[in-house]
Structures are given as C-alpha cells and as structure tokens.
Image (cartoon, rainbow, N blue to C red):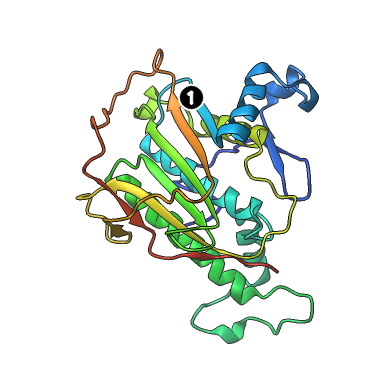
Amino acid sequence: MDGSVLLGEQEELARPILLTSRTERFITDSDKEIGVVENNASDEEKELVHRAKEECMVDVVFPGRVTKEGCCRFVCEILKCVLYQRQQLPMTYDQLVYHQKQQQPSYCPAVAKKWPLRAAGEWDWRKCHRTLQAVEEVLTHLEILFSLSLVPRVLLMLGGSVLLPKELYELNMEDVSLGTGDCSLRTSVCLRQLFRALFVADILPDARPVRLMTTTVMALAHRDCGVTGFCPKMNFRVPVRVKKQVIRLSCDRSVARAMLEHPSDWADYVWFQAPVNIKGFCK
C-alpha cells in the first residue's frame, strides 16, 4: 500500500498553515476568502474550544452522509496525525515515506547491508523503516476491518499498557450516517472539516517534549466479522483511570437519513487489537 495515498483516493486534503514547529492548521480556500483569522473566532469555534477543555470532547457534525471507506480514512489520518503531533515521528508519516524512498530507493529488507553506515547526527534509517512498516501494517489491517464490519469506535493508546495507557484518544462514529457513492459527501471535504475542528480545539498539544512510546490501536467491530489480522479481546474494557480525548463524529440528521442502518445496540460487537504496536521513532 502506498503510504501517501490511502484507499486509492488522490485528493488534496487542504492547505497547511504552519503555526509552530510541529502544529499545522488546515483551512480551505473559502475560509481565506471570507477572512477567517485566529483572533476573531466564531461563537461555534469558541464553543468547540470550551468543550475540548472542559469535557475533553470534540464534536464534528458532517452536513450529509459519509461512506464506510471515508470512516476508515478518518481513522487512518487521525492515527498519522496523533503520531506526529505527539512527537512519535520526527515528521509527518507521508514525509517520512518520501524521505525514506529518497534515501534508499533500492532498499530490500532481506539485505540489511544495503543501508549505508550511519554517521554521527544522521538518522537511523533501519529504525525508521521498522516504524513505517508497523504504521503501514496497521493502516492496511484497518482497511480490511472496515471492509468486513461497521467500526463504531476506535481507540489510540499511547504508552503504558492497554489497561492503563499514558494517553488515550477515542474516535467515536456511532452516530455517523452511512451512504454510498454520489449520495455521500466527498471524503476530502469531510477531512478538511475534521482537521479544522481538531486544530481549533487544540486537543493535541505539542509544547512539552514527549518521550517515545508504543502506540496500540483497538477497534470495536462485529464479533463474527471474520477478520484475521486483528486479535479479539472479549474481556477488554476501555480504561477509565486515564484522561481520554474523544473525537465524536456524526451527521446532520435533518439532511442525512441513514442509508445503511446501524444496529439498535452494539451487543454483538467486541474490541479487536491491531496485530502490531507502533514504536515511536526519533531521528
């Protein structure tokens, strides 16, 4: 799978504006035309920031239906964003993939000698490759899982253990209305809205240095979906003794009547753990 393009969709997400050395805010061209500025936030943005600080929750309401593939894309892009913003990658995932290809385009994992000797101060490209390989494997397995089952919730757990992680991020999609094809919003448009909300809410602070940690991905899916990569964790319970940041996605029900109905409850859904953990990499 090409790390720069998930699910075969080649759409430019948005134009990044650099705020700090690691923080990017995504805005659309229409935002720029109407003169949206940081010091003149709308009431909606102020409420978004307030809820993020007081309730550790960011609500994103899409003005229409989204596809299952789009939901998978949301999860994959947020995972890559969290890894970068929480300093588990020295640059964005897509940039790392590009730089690795530039560094050693003919690299073969079976022949480690093809990597040049590392000089003082240079990157350890072997460790970089292992980290990127783990991220790519998780992204691929997420695509497979989303193709087999509805996935209403995904957890990203950094550091510690699955019972008591250091940081916990939840992507909740229980209230998303699913559609197909032309009856759904473009994924790129939804991603711009999602990332705009995330960076306005500022739930991924990067001011303080963060040590390298291991990231574990858990996903809620139907117990009989037949997925082979993820490992079912029947007795898993979401940790409650750790501060949790929740990103809750939904669709405006006045314009987005669900085409694919959700189950009345999620009793037949269990937690699955990704087959590999992602170890942070620093140059």
Foreground residue among 150 and 265: 265
Q: Is residue 147 visible?
A: yes
For this orientation, the residue located farthest to the front is 241
Q: Is residue 70 visible?
A: no
Foreground residue among 92 and 111: 92
Vertical comparison of 116 with 137: above or below: below
Instruction: Name the residue at 70% across, 69% down.
Output: 283
Q: Indicate the position of residue 184 as horizontal and vertical percent values.
A: 40, 25
The amino acid type of the residue labelled 1 equals Phe
99 to the left or right of 179: right
40 to the left or right of 233: right
For the residue labelled by badge 1, is the local secondary structure a helix, a strand or a loop? strand
Q: In the figure, residue 69 lies in which quadrant?
A: top left
Foreground residue among 138 and 246: 246
Vertical comparison of 160 with 9: above or below: below
Q: Indicate the position of residue 265 as horizontal and vertical percent values.
A: 24, 34
* Mark 1 burial class by Cα count in 10 Å: few <14, some 14-19, many 20+: many
Q: In the figure, residue 103 lies in which quadrant?
A: bottom right
Instruction: Name the residue at 67% across, 66% down.
Output: 102
Q: Indicate the position of residue 168 as horizontal and vertical percent values.
A: 51, 50
Vertical comparison of 220 with 236: above or below: above
Vertical comparison of 117 with 134: above or below: below
Instruction: Name the residue at 54% across, 34% down.
Output: 57
For the image, the number of numbered tags is 1
For this orientation, the residue located farthest to the top is 254
Foreground residue among 163 and 77: 163
Residue ID for mark 1: 62
Q: Indicate the position of residue 177 as horizontal and vertical percent values.
A: 36, 26
